[in-house]
Image: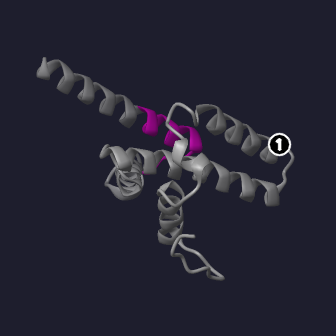
Amino acid sequence: MVDFECKSHYGIQDLLRIMELLRSPDGCPWDREQTHESLKKCFMDETEEVMQAIDHQDDENLCEELGDVLLQVLLHAEIAKERGAFTFEDVVQGLSEKLIRRHPHVFGNVKRPETPEESLALWKEVKKKEKEKKQQKIEAAR
């Protein structure tokens, strides 16, 4: 048995610790054996279950299925951390930076879109510029 204190309420740090323990030598054999490749079907299945919960307007099931998708994210991040590739914190950092960059009308000084369609167009425009810049860096490195 691993050293872990059960609580009545858990936060994200607890969840990260649980995942670390599940992948540890004293953890769960199934969790330890998983790879990015072995989890691909599970990730797709969990995503499909989220879609079904949305289609059925089943909030209770949606909450559970979103947890299962988060489990997939945590597993992939833990596997990557073990390889020294990236951590869950890196995923959070990257997503935070992307959300800020792609919402210059909220976090910057760009004129606020009037409609959801204008917001989406702005998102796509920023994304396109990011991809162009990334491609230029790749080409410059060659």
Figure colour scheme: one colour
Query: Is 19 included in the stretch rendered in magenta?
Result: no
- Tell me the amino acid under the disc marked 1: Asp
User: Magenta span covers which residues?
Assistant: 111-124
Quarter placement of the C terminus: top left
Image coords of residue 109 (percent x, y)? 31, 54
Task: Give me the residue at 62% from left, 38% from top.
Answer: 43
**Where does label 1 land, which residue?**
55
Q: Is residue 111 visible?
A: no
Image coords of residue 92 (percent x, y)? 41, 55
- 97 relative to 68 in the view: left or right: left
Q: Main SS type for the magenta part? A: helix
Task: Give me the residue at 30% from left, 46% from top.
Answer: 84
Q: Nearer the viewer, residue 80 or 122?
A: 80
Q: Is residue 41 visible?
A: yes
Image coords of residue 115 (percent x, y)? 57, 45
